[in-house]
Image: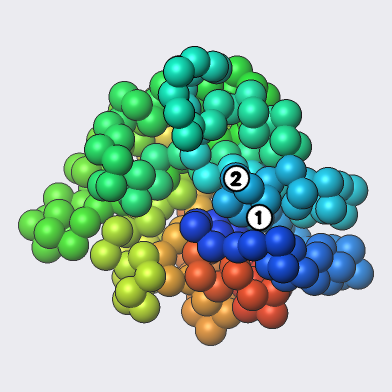
Amino acid sequence: MSAARPLVAGNWKMNGLASSLDEARAVAAAVEVHPPACRVALCPPATLVARMAEMLGGTGVEVGGQDCRAEASGAYTGDIAAEMLADAGADLVILGHSERRAGYSETDAIVSAKVDAALRAGLEPIVCVGETLAEREGGQTLAVVTGQVRGSLPASLSGKAFAVAYEPVWAIGTGLTPTLEQIEEVHIAIRATLIEVLGETGGRAPILYGGSVKPSNAAEILKAREVGGALVGGASLKAEDFLGIIKAA
């Protein structure tokens, strides 16, 4: 089973105005001059997806959304369908991020339905999983994370391109990072679960690490077993920081 090419994706979250596109432009310029060993993607807020996709077309930097609704259309004020993201030029979409699971009560079943929607629209899903500090301290990490993998990844992913992002909730935006041993333990468990659920497809999908990834720790984390890239938050907002992580992949 050959693994997919590593992926380093930036999640801008609710940050970024038109002026922020200069940072994306700088990333694309650097990637064009020095093509990295990994795939590179940026996931801006929905207001910038179309403009960024148009600007980065043909540069090697892919563009993604940060969420989508399971339905293709309807009376869902403020929500975005996967088809709308694809129409705006997106290639990927982040689904099941811990901030969505906690803040919007998204269950595994909801995330799974959104994954189906992403595939329906031709988008590559990045499915997020991860444990809280209480779950980590209670010795529940592997049970929680592998349970989220089983519940959030529908059978329709078989034969399709996708990624899983392991983000320990307690490490997101806190500056805290698990030890390499802890990261490897979870990534190895995720890989075993992916193979159990999706067979060969699960053996190829990249498993990204996310949670306070920065240029200073990226090289060490990205060399850990079964780490196939990174989902980067705050450090992706500045081209210099994001490029430092990309170079480490």
Residue 46's label in the rendered image is 2
Q: Nearer the viewer, mark 1 or mark 2?
A: 2
Disc 1 element? strand
Tell me what residue is drawn at x 47 percent, y 34 percent.
Answer: 78
Q: Is residue 146 above or below residue 20?
A: above
Disc 2 element? helix
Image location (x, y in percent) of residue 141: 21, 52
Tell me what residue is drawn at x 82 percent, y 53 percent.
Answer: 56
Give the amino acid type for the residue marked by disc 2 in the picture.
Ala
Image location (x, y in percent) of residue 202: 50, 33
Q: Say left or right for 151 vs 83.
A: left
Coloring basis for residues: rainbow
Q: Quadrant of the N terminus?
A: top right
Residue 211 seen anywhere in this rendered image of the structure: yes
Q: CA distance from mark 1 to mark 2?
A: 12 Å
Image location (x, y in percent) of residue 126: 52, 41
